[in-house]
Each structure stands twice: as structure tokens, then as C-alpha cells.
Image (cartoon, helix red, strand yellow):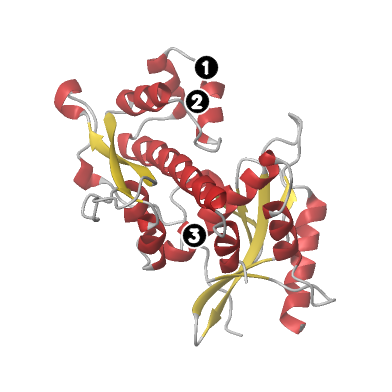
Amino acid sequence: MLDGLYERLARTPEGRRELAAARLRRGALNLLHRSLKASGLTQAEVAKRLGIRRSAVNQVLRGDGNVRIDTLAEYLHTMGYEATLTLVEAGKPRQAALHGRAREASTNWANANAGATTSSVSMVVQVKNASSDTGTGPRVSEWRSPSLSPPLAGGR
Amino acid sequence: MIEAARDRECVERAAEYLFGLAAARSKRRRRQAFDVAVLLEEFGANGELENPFQHRRLDGELWEFKTKDLRLPYYELLDAEHGRIARVTHVFEKAKGKTAEGKTPRAHIRRGLAILEEDRKC
């Protein structure tokens, strides 16, 4: 069962640390895609606003999310958003995901218990609409999850 | 729920590959396993992925998860007890080179479809 992959990787402190890093990369990448969709901009338009090639934007969007903080902020702001970081106790994101709240977990654990009891913590990203200082971009409440699920196959 | 499909020898090729990655000496390869683990976690929890570039239909019932370096063809079952089950047929590294950009080699699609059929019999 592939659900056991995570547990196998999380057996060691190094593994748990790497998983936290992978989760943060994933969170950053998801934010970029969410803001692109919400802004209604095309990759070409984002590239034009940033003064870079479209292929560079495409490379970031198809990457693993391991972008510089500056780059993330510039992309998000160009699309009308900005991100803040929230500190949560290590392991909380996994618990949230196991309870079927991975989307919420990957973007906003503002309601989670942020009182870390160890020195090992995870940082997560929370995206906010930057329209207040740009006058552009949709409201946060306008975001909708993309429906990408494949049709279900027949029962077994 | 996400599981590995079984081929005609009842071997879970995807699990074999991913657990191999997890134990790899190379940090780059281990990192691929970490990226897959959090991708599968998101899909398992939400039943979908937020990033449209990481999920697409290949052929018929065969779909594909994509990370930066890896491709994971899969199909879905509906089980009365567990609900939706995504069964990953196998894992392979994405094709390199400009001409292969974004394309899944036909051989891997055929392999995925073959394992899909074998998995149903196994």
C-alpha cells in the first residue's frame, strides 16, 4: 500500500525534516497555481508583468516549488496576492492531512495550535489578496478549488 | 486511498520503485520520494490535486500523477468498503529532451494499461 510510503520516510528525524521541506515546497507551488487561477491571468501575462520570458514562468509553475522567497513574493504580487508564513508544531500538517484537510493544511493552519513544544517546527504559507495596495485581483472568497478528479471506474 | 497495482506476477511495481527511492543513497533520488509522498498525501486527503500540471488523463481509464521528475500512471476503483481507490500501475522518470517535453512515452502508457488489466485479475 502506497499510503505506507510516508510512514516509511518519516521513520527517521532526517526523513521527517525532508518531508516538512517537501510539504512547504508543495505549499508554495500550490499557492502559485491558486493565485494564477484566481487572478485569471495567463502565464504570458504574468511573464510580461514580471519582465521575463514565458518559458521562465512555465518552468516555475512546472517545477517542484523550490523557489526563492523573493521569487514567490514577486510572482504572487504580480498576480494580486501576497503570502504570509505561519508557524505550526512539527507533525500537525500530517495530522491535518490524515483527517482529510490537506488543502486547508497546505495553505492555512491559522487555527491550528501554534504553540510548538519542541524546537522542530514547520512553516506554512498563507496567501492573502494584495488588491488593497494594487487595486487589482479578485477577493480571497472568490477562490474555488479546481475540479480535476477523474471519473470513477467501475466497482470491483 | 492510494495503493500500488499488481502486475501479472502479483508484484507491486510502483511500491517497489518508490520504496527503492526512499532507500536510495542519492539525496536527489530520495527527494523524489519525498515529493511523491506529499503529492499522494494531498490526493489521498482531497481526492484531487490543486496543481493542474501534476495530474492528467493518459488514455481511457489511465491517469497520471506528475512530479518534477517522476510520472505515476494510475487508475481508479470504487470499493464499497474504502470508497475511491487510486491504484498506481508503475513509476518512471520523465523523458528528457525538448522533443519529449510534456509527452508520456507510448510504451509507458501501454505498460500502464497492461498492468491495469493484470491488476484486475490478480
The residue indicated by pointer 1 is A53
Question: Camera-side residue: B7 or B30?
Answer: B30
Q: Chain of mark 1?
A: A
Circles 2 and 1 on the same chain: yes
* Image height of A73 relative to B119, above or below: above
Question: Label 1 neighbourhood size at 10 Å, few (<14), some (14-19), many (20+)?
Answer: few
Residue at the farthest left position: A132
Q: Which element carries disc 2, helix, strand or loop?
A: helix
* Image height of B38 relative to B76, above or below: above
Q: CA distance from mark 2 to mark 1?
A: 7 Å
Residue at 38% across / 40% down in the picture?
A: A31
Residue at 71% across / 52% down in the picture?
A: B21
Residue at the farthest right position: B9
Residue at 74% across / 58% down in the picture?
A: B17
Q: Tag on residue B41?
A: 3
Q: CA distance from mark 1 to mark 3?
A: 33 Å
Question: Could you tell me the amino acid type at mark 2?
Answer: Val
